């Protein structure tokens, strides 16, 4: 039996079609309508609701309709943002950046025309560039706000829209940072109030900035490092078909490092990401070509950026081949390095990251804070933030320069650390062992479940709340923390284990963040920790029913 067709849904789709300024997406939606009743489910999904601001702004599939990324949605988003800025008395330019994904340049250019249509100056970055360059530009140009068109490490069929606020509306700790509540809800309300795309006045194309903004970013990125330190390091690198390649190489050269060897097949931006199944350094196989190059080059260090270069992944050589460091491992290495360099201020991470940073800060006598997940919260932990990281390969090593995660300055900083250790006959892996000997091995892992039906995430969270585990790894659960209703986060703790469960804010995933703490002989702790993590993963999978 053919599915029932909602007459009201068809009317809404026809109205959207008539208001859509893009002939390509109009044709796409028309084909869906012409395919009814067989395409009723697809039409319903496209109109199930508008995209909303999650952990990192708007993000969704490139497709026609309100529940997708397209020119009509972007026009409404830009108009809502402009209205919200005007209502709060925000003055100054809107700066706009974009990556090399499908539609990114067009979405950025439309945002500029919407901004100038309201009488506001629009400044576009001079080409597809990393997200941290946009975050830098918001501060450097004293912009009222910034927009970055990117879907970061999502699949090729996605795009997104991040919004940043300048100092005027974001305050000292939020200057150049991603928006947080209640700004996101206010902008969403303004978007919903846009009567039609046709009613949005479009102005001139705005001003395309010259190369000086990128030159300033590269100069300031190189200046993050201590001058005159060791720079003897062989590095293999991949931008993973993204926009970070030339910027990172320029920054390394400016900082005095030899130019990294770059994975040739992944060196240039390509919105199809043809050599990786999923353009995220955390995904299995994504770094295979990088590690092969690192072996060929006899590299000291292998570095990968995600496609918009706000994340940084690092792998190190060992007796059994190259080993990618977990985000928690690199985060603590960077924090330890900056603390030993005497960088003052607060060190922060999130509630799902390793607890080792807190122990390190307590032992070194430096301020420490934990925040909710997302860099928009990390960078607001304190105005005098010195360093922040999240386990998903995001690091902020220079908050006064970029108030967001920055995969380029993070790469520079880990290279500085590695070069300094190499000059002493030491390694990053060895430094991790030293920290484990001092504080215990804090081993982390993740149980990540991708779903097709988002309702399954809610059902799994309900199961964990209704029947929580009484023990983890044979030890009694001593603490349960439930952040509902403000946040859908559930934490279980024992003296030697911790599990934090939450839905992803950027992808259709349920995530459980696992940590075990193992002490004893360094030669056996990693084996024991791996076994404990595997057992803990199985226990939590049973709790969640996944």
Image: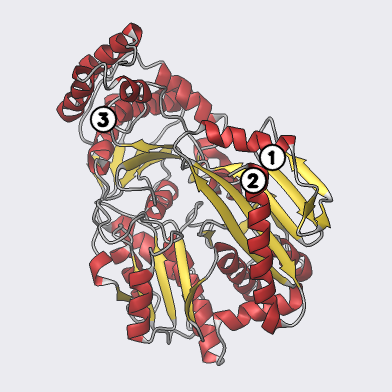
**For numbered disc 1, what is the local secondary structure?**
helix
Of all residues, the one furthest to the front in this rendering is: 1
Q: Nearer the viewer, residue 431 or 250?
A: 431
Write down the residue under mark 1.
464
Q: Are the two marked residues, 2 and 1, in contact with CB atoms closer than 8 angstroms?
A: yes
Q: Nearer the viewer, residue 528 or 271?
A: 528
Query: Is residue 96 placed above or below 313 in the rendered structure?
Result: above
Look at discs 3 and 1 and give the one toward the viewer. Answer: 1
Residue 545 drawn at (x, y percent): 62, 42
**For numbered disc 2, what is the local secondary structure?**
strand
Residue 165 drawn at (x, y percent): 47, 39
Q: Residues within 10 Å of mark 2 (few under 14, many from 20)?
A: many
* Disc with the residue nearer the chain's start (2 vs 3): 3
- Which numbered marker is on residue 71? 3
Question: How many marks on residues?
Answer: 3
Marks 2/3: CA distance? 35 Å
Q: Nearer the viewer, residue 241 or 28?
A: 28
Q: Toward which corner of the image does residue 124 lie, by quadrant?
A: top left
**For numbered disc 3, what is the local secondary structure?**
helix
* Disc with the residue nearer the chain's start (2 vs 1): 1
Q: Is residue 84 left or right of residue 112?
A: right
Q: Are the two marked residues, 3 and 1, in contact with CB atoms closer than 8 angstroms?
A: no
Write down the residue under mark 2.
501
Task: Give the residue drawn at x 26%, y 12%.
Answer: 15
């Amino acid at each position: 039996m053919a599915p029932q067709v909602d007459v009201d849904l068809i009317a809404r789709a026809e109205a959207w079609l008539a208001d859509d300024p893009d002939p390509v997406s109009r044709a796409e939606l028309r084909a869906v309508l012409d395919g009814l009743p067989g395409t009723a489910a697809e039409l319903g999904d496209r109109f199930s609701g508008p995209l909303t601001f999650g952990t990192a702004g708007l993000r969704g599939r490139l497709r026609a309709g309100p529940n997708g990324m397209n020119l009509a949605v972007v026009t409404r988003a830009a108009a809502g943002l402009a209205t919200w800025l005007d209502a709060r008395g925000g003055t100054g330019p809107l700066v706009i950046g974009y990556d090399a994904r499908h539609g990114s340049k067009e979405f950025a250019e439309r945002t500029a025309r919407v901004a100038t249509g309201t009488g506001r100056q629009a400044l576009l970055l001079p080409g597809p560039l990393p997200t941290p360059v946009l975050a830098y530009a918001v501060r450097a140009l004293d912009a009222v706000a910034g927009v970055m068109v990117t879907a970061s490490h999502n699949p090729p069929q996605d795009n997104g829209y991040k919004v940043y606020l300048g100092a005027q509306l974001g305050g000292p700790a939020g200057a150049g940072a991603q928006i947080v509540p209640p700004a996101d809800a206010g902008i969403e309300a303004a978007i919903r109030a846009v009567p039609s795309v046709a009613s949005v006045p479009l102005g001139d194309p705005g001003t395309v900035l010259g190369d000086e903004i990128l030159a300033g970013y590269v100069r300031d990125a190189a200046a993050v490092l201590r001058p005159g330190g060791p720079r003897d390091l062989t590095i293999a690198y991949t931008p993973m078909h993204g926009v970070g390649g030339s910027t990172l190489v320029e920054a390394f050269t400016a900082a005095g490092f030899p130019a990294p060897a770059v994975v040739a097949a992944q060196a240039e931006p390509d919105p199809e990401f043809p050599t990786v199944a999923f353009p995220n350094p955390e995904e299995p196989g994504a770094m295979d070509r990088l590690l092969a190059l690192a072996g060929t080059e006899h590299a000291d260090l292998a570095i990968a950026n995600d496609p918009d270069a706000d994340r940084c992944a690092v792998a190190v050589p060992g007796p059994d081949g190259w080993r990618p460091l977990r985000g928690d491992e690199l985060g603590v290495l960077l924090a330890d390095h900056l603390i030993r360099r005497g960088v003052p201020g607060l060190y922060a991470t999130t509630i799902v990251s390793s607890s080792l940073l807190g122990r390190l800060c307590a032992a070194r006598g430096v301020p420490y804070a934990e925040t909710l997940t997302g860099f928009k919260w990390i960078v607001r932990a304190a105005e005098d933030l010195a360093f922040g990281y999240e386990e998903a390969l995001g690091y902020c090593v220079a908050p006064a320069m970029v108030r967001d995660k920055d995969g380029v300055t993070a790469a520079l900083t880990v290279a500085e650390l590695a070069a300094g250790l190499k000059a002493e006959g030491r390694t990053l892996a060895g430094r991790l062992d030293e920290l484990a000997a001092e504080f215990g091995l804090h081993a982390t892992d993740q149980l990540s479940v991708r779903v097709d039906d988002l309702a399954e995430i809610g059902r799994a969270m309900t199961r964990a709340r209704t029947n929580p585990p009484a023990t983890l790894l044979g030890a009694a659960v001593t603490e349960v923390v439930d952040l509902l209703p403000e946040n859908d986060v559930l934490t279980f703790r024992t003296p030697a284990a911790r599990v934090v469960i939450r839905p992803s804010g950027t992808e259709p995933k349920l995530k459980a963040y696992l940590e075990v703490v193992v002490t004893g002989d360094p030669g056996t702790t990693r084996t024991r920790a791996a076994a404990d993590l595997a057992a803990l993963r199985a226990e939590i999978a049973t709790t969640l029913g996944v």
